[in-house]
Image: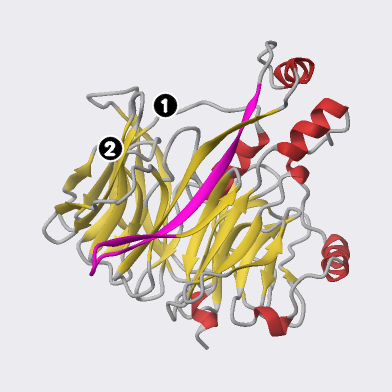
Amino acid sequence: MTRFRIAAGIVLLLMLAALGWPTAAQTNALPFAAITQDQLMLYGLGDTPVAATAPGAYWDYAQLVWSPDGNTLALIGIDSEYREHLLITDRAGSAPVDLTGTPARMFPVSFSADGQIVYAEDTGQFMTLNEGPGGTVVNVQSVAPTAGAVPTTLGQFTWGVGCGGGSSIPAHWLYWSETEGSPGNSPLALAVTPSGIVHSINCTGIGTALLDPATGTDTELGTQLGWVSVSPDGSRLLGISKERGDPPSAQLVTIDLATRTTTPIAMASPVIPDLVVWSADGNSIFYSTLQESGNVIPATPEEQQILGEAIGSMEPATLPLNIVTIHRFDLTTMTDTELYSGQAFAIGRMAPTPDGTGLLFSQIPNMEQWVTALIGGTAPEDPLTLFPVTLNYLDLTTGAVSPIASDVNQFAFNAGAAVQ
């Protein structure tokens, strides 16, 4: 990874301008943070994109999230000794401030209703579990977004460990980065709600529980429940209950966190949802799907042999070309509507606009460009340069899709700034 340097940030801004990136007039209504060429960038908050620089201090940022008022960006960064730090910056792109050096990077960071930053801290304490290799004790911490603030422990749970796996396919790396997930698994959950703390129970992210911080009681909400999202008012949980198998099955569900009542969502088409988010008003949900188109690359046996050797299989290999879709399910009328379909490897993440008129989504391209470069012997040292993640805007009124930017990874939409 390239570390942040002021000179590199200046060069990057010049490059973005030359490539025709959106102007302030085009993006003021769509402010967001993202990672571009290993830089933490802020878009739509000024005349040009701004690099939040901290020369030589932090890199490999993750878990980006804006405060409800849109003024503070919290995230996790890695220092030169590969230690994790909880950082904050502001809308001006000031150098990140280190709040604490103890966050557990795999868990999401969030803001509570009273403006505190909520994060997970791995205590290093190991516990023996009835199933699996064991678990570590995780503290749920809260800290004010102010330099020198002292964290407070909200609760504690044991989290099952022992996951592994990987891939030689760069598109997989980007998908796990965009979703904050891991091979074949769900992104982890951690969120404070009026009914308790929603969290994943193991490193797969599949299995979700609700922790009562007052009593320490942990109640399972679903052993196969993952990909979860808390409703805007904090009263419900949306998620996907997946069963592995051939073929696999998946069921969208909502859970009333006060009563623990689970309600299946009857989707009209036999698709497997991939990611889910709530609408801004909580009356609808958006979900994405991905499936193989039936077409594969490369075409010839000779090219397939080259690809197989390049990805380590040593046998002739092909890779699928995927089709992605985005759906909206109206929880009032119980109608399922396909909003978008396109040729892509996967949808990375989605975020609705506060006024309910649009949906931002990132998209990871299919693998044609990378496979062509591999076969032609021109693949770059960093293959991710051949997979630019694009950010798009879906107009929910007209159905039109407009590209916003390219090479923007792990975007975090600033909903608070968008309504000001």
Can residue 152 be seen from the camera position used here?
A: no
Residue identifier under label 2: 224
**The residue under label 2 is which amino acid type?**
Gln
Q: Was residue 63 drawn as part of the magenta stretch in this picture? A: no
Magenta stretch: dominant secondary structure: strand
Counting from the top left corner in percent of width and height, residue 114 is at 35, 76
Q: Was residue 336 drawn as part of the magenta stretch in this picture? A: yes
Task: Give 408 or 155, whichever is nearer the viewer.
Answer: 408
| Lower position in the chain sequence, tag 1 or tag 2 | 1
| Relative side of 182 to 342, left or right | left
Quick check: 286 above or below 70? above
Q: How is the image coloured?
A: secondary structure
Q: Quadrant of the N terminus?
A: top right
Range of magenta residues: 318-338
In the image, which disc is placed on residue 162? 1
Counting from the top left corner in percent of width and height, residue 47 is at 76, 82
The answer to which quarter of the image holds residue 281 is: bottom left
Cα–Cα span, label 1 and label 2: 17 Å
